[in-house]
């Protein structure tokens, strides 16, 4: 509980953590909105393919013009300002950079950035959770081989769940389930960027004001992002994925203890130690009160009578058996909270969540009938959505990971609502992301 004091000390000693941010989209801008308020942290460089848009986002986030006017990295170091450039590798390879924050959101590009950082001996905080779902276990192994830290981004839900699971286990509880909330109707899995705002509950004007990317937000709505984040949680926390995908049980926070237990005990789970997503809409599509839509939870089980009695004595809300309880964080603030990862990695050399295994996977499922010759448009688009599966099922079946389903040609017809396989598409096998994905798949047989 001393991170802020340690940051203050770094500021006093004039030894700030020098950070390079790759990608100045929504997540990156949210972090940058906070970065000027963090003692002991100096964002020395920002890389984005569109420098003018990046600078516009900095202005939107409240940065004064002079703060991002440095003409070079050296000038940024001398002045305390920030250098904005379109070349990520220039920042990643710079000796003055202590830590790389990757937040492009593109798993193929992100893997290249992460691996370049490792080769340059730099730790990485990755907000591109898509890369974790695709090949996180292999990336974590590469980080260990290079002697650096690879971390999920605090503020995104997977890292917040990792924190809750770590709390539970460190306290001596058994973790029954963990996950996040969502707004879900089964028909949302067919949503496109054209339909997202009505479903999401925003007007086009609100979306434009916030410079919100309809494809990115559609990936939340159509179930892709919940699947991606659930896979990251499972792989970092040693939890299992449901065999037929997420169930999205409807309920409030107070319903979680009864729901997040095995079916044979009255819950919805296949077994103990699962990931799941709770739905904030009831069967009629109406909003449920006191929901966890924007938050995260862990459900724990009292494994001794003494634990159970303590829960009763301290008036903990439990399931009807008195042995399951839920701890939660109702809100997550995305990039506004990323300072926690920067501080943990930069000061302690400790991640805020890393894949330890490849237990859960996100597969590409057709949103409509697909025909040979057309191109898949990846996460949040018009052609495919991501669904969660156990890796032990998806890998032997040759199912196509969602992370490789962008910009690839369809070779065979695929019916709507059917999973795609590697054989259905033309994948570029020269991609580093593809090769690391195959390395992650090989871990299942070890």
Image: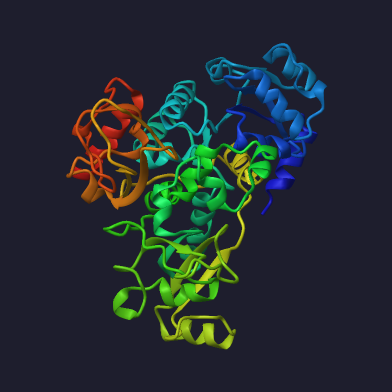
Viewer-proximal residue, 264 or 96?
264
Q: Quadrant of the N terminus?
A: bottom right
Q: Is residue 294 above or below residue 341?
A: below
Q: Is residue 230 left or right of residue 392?
A: right
Residue name at image x 34 percent, y 69 percent: 269
Viewer-proximal residue, 106 or 409?
409
Spot occupied by residue 175 in the image (x, y as percentages of width and height): 41, 67
Spot occupied by residue 352 in the image (x, y as percentages of width and height): 53, 47
Spot occupied by residue 284 in the image (x, y as percentages of width and height): 47, 70
Q: Is residue 272 above or below residue 52?
A: below
Viewer-proximal residue, 304 or 415?
415
Spot occupied by residue 39 in the image (x, y as percentages of width and height): 76, 38
Q: Is residue 32 above or below residue 115?
A: below
Answer whether residue 202 is visible to the viewer in this image: yes
Residue name at image x 29 percent, y 68 percent: 270
Q: Quadrant of the C terminus?
A: top left
Q: Is residue 389 left or right of residue 261?
A: left
């Amino acid at each position: 509980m001393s991170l802020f004091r340690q940051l203050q000390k770094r500021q006093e000693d004039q030894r700030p953590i020098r950070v390079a941010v790759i990608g100045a989209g929504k997540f990156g801008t949210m972090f940058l909105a906070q970065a000027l308020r963090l003692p002991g942290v100096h964002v020395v460089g920002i890389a984005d393919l569109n420098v003018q848009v990046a600078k516009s986002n900095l202005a939107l986030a409240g940065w004064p013009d002079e703060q991002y006017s440095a003409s070079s990295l050296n000038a940024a170091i001398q002045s305390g300002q920030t250098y904005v450039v379109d070349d990520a590798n220039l920042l990643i390879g710079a000796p003055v950079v202590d830590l790389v924050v990757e937040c492009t959101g593109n798993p193929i590009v992100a893997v290249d950035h992460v691996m370049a950082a490792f080769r340059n001996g730099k730790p990485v905080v990755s907000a591109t959770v898509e890369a974790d779902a695709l090949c996180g276990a292999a990336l974590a192994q590469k980080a260990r081989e290079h002697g650096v830290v690879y971390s999920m981004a605090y503020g995104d839900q997977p890292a917040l769940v990792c924190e809750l699971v770590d709390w539970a286990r460190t306290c001596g509880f058994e973790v029954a389930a963990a996950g996040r909330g969502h707004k879900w109707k089964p028909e949302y899995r067919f949503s496109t960027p054209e339909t997202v705002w009505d479903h999401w509950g925003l007007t086009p004007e609100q979306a434009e004001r916030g410079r919100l990317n309809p494809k990115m937000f559609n990936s939340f709505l159509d179930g892709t992002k919940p699947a991606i984040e659930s896979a990251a949680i499972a792989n970092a926390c040693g939890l299992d994925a449901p065999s037929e995908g997420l169930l999205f049980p409807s309920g409030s926070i107070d319903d979680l203890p009864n729901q997040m237990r095995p079916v044979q005990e009255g819950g919805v789970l296949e077994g103990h130690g699962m990931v799941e997503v709770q739905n904030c809409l009831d069967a009629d599509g109406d909003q449920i009160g006191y929901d966890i839509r924007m938050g995260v939870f862990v459900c724990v089980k009292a494994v001794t009578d003494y634990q159970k009695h303590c829960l009763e004595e301290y008036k903990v809300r439990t399931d009807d058996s008195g042995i399951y309880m839920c701890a939660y964080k109702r809100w997550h603030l995305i990039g506004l909270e990323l300072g926690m990862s920067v501080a943990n990695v930069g000061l302690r050399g400790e991640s805020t969540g890393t894949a330890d295994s490849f237990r859960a996977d996100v597969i590409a499922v057709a949103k409509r009938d697909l025909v040979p010759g057309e191109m898949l448009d990846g996460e949040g688009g018009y052609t495919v959505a991501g669904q969660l599966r156990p890796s032990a099922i998806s890998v032997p079946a040759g199912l196509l990971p969602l992370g490789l389903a962008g910009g690839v040609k369809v070779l065979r017809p695929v019916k709507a609502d059917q999973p795609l396989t590697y054989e259905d598409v033309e994948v570029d096998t020269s991609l580093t992301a593809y090769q690391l994905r195959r390395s992650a798949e090989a871990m299942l047989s070890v």
